[in-house]
Amino acid sequence: MVPPPTRRRRPEATRAALLEAARLEFEDPGYDATHTNRIAARAGFAPQTFYRHFRDKPAIFLAVYRRWAESELDLLEGVQDAAGAAAVLIASHRASLNFRRALRVLSLTDPALRTARADSRRLQIARLTERLPHLSSRSFDRLAAELLALERLADACAEGEFQDLGIAEEVAAARLADAIRQTFGP
């Protein structure tokens, strides 16, 4: 009798599958309704597999956030104008509504996540000043304030807050594009 073939472990593939499953879980049903067993099952693994790669749910949330932030930066790299940047931001924020809501709440209570979020924003500012050299004459605090304002506007567009005020989605996107244009120049 021939023994069954053994599955060769590929830790990087397992980790990637767990991250994607966690991202989907955090988006629906949401952070609070998700537990590590659901993440492992969604990725096609037994619960103990989760703990070989992540300490707990906050640890994988942090990893998902870092992956999401890097992905958003990569999406913005190819954008050539403010309207395109607004569209990318709105689409990215809309695709991760529940995740971003959890991110805002957890940033208030989880020091590691708060630090990662600050690091991500510093990276955004560094990339922006590399790509747009005229921004290097602005102070870091001004760029940070402008980045935070744009982030909030993108969330408001993605979450339908403008529509709640009777402002059409296209107009809201145009206002975000205007703010991007004013912030980053020509």
Image (cartoon, rainbow, N blue to C red):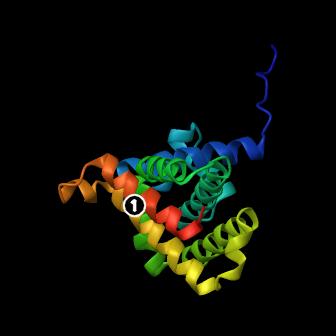
Q: Nearer the viewer, residue 88 or 132?
A: 132
Please say whether residue 23 is visible from this viewpoint. Answer: yes
Among all residues in the image, which is located at the extreme top? 1
Question: As drawn, is 16 to the left or to the right of 81?
Answer: right
Find residue 166 and report its horizontal and vertical position in percent.
17, 55
Residue 64 falls in which quadrant of the image? bottom right
Label 1, residues with CA under 10 Å away: few <14, some 14-19, many ≥20: many
Quadrant into which the N terminus falls: top right
**Amino acid type of the residue that numbered disc 1 sits on in the rendered structure:** Asp
Number of labels in the image equals: 1
The residue that label 1 is drawn on is: 155
In the foreground, 55 or 106: 106
In this rendering, the answer to whether 167 lies above or below 46 is below
Where residue 109 appears, x then y in whole percent?
45, 80
Asked whether, in this view, residue 175 is left or right of residue 75, the answer is left
- For image coordinates 65% across by 57% down, the residue present is 70
> Does residue 111 appear left or right of residue 11 in this picture?
left
Q: Observer-nearest residue: 103 or 80? A: 80
Residue 16 at x, y percent in the picture: 67, 45
Residue visible at 72% across and 41% down in the picture: 13
For residue 58, above or below residue 109: above
**Residue 96 location (% of width, % of height):** 44, 51
Q: Say which element carries label 1.
A: helix
150 vs 185, left or right, is left
Q: Quadrant of residue 101?
A: bottom left
Quadrant that contains the C terminus: bottom right
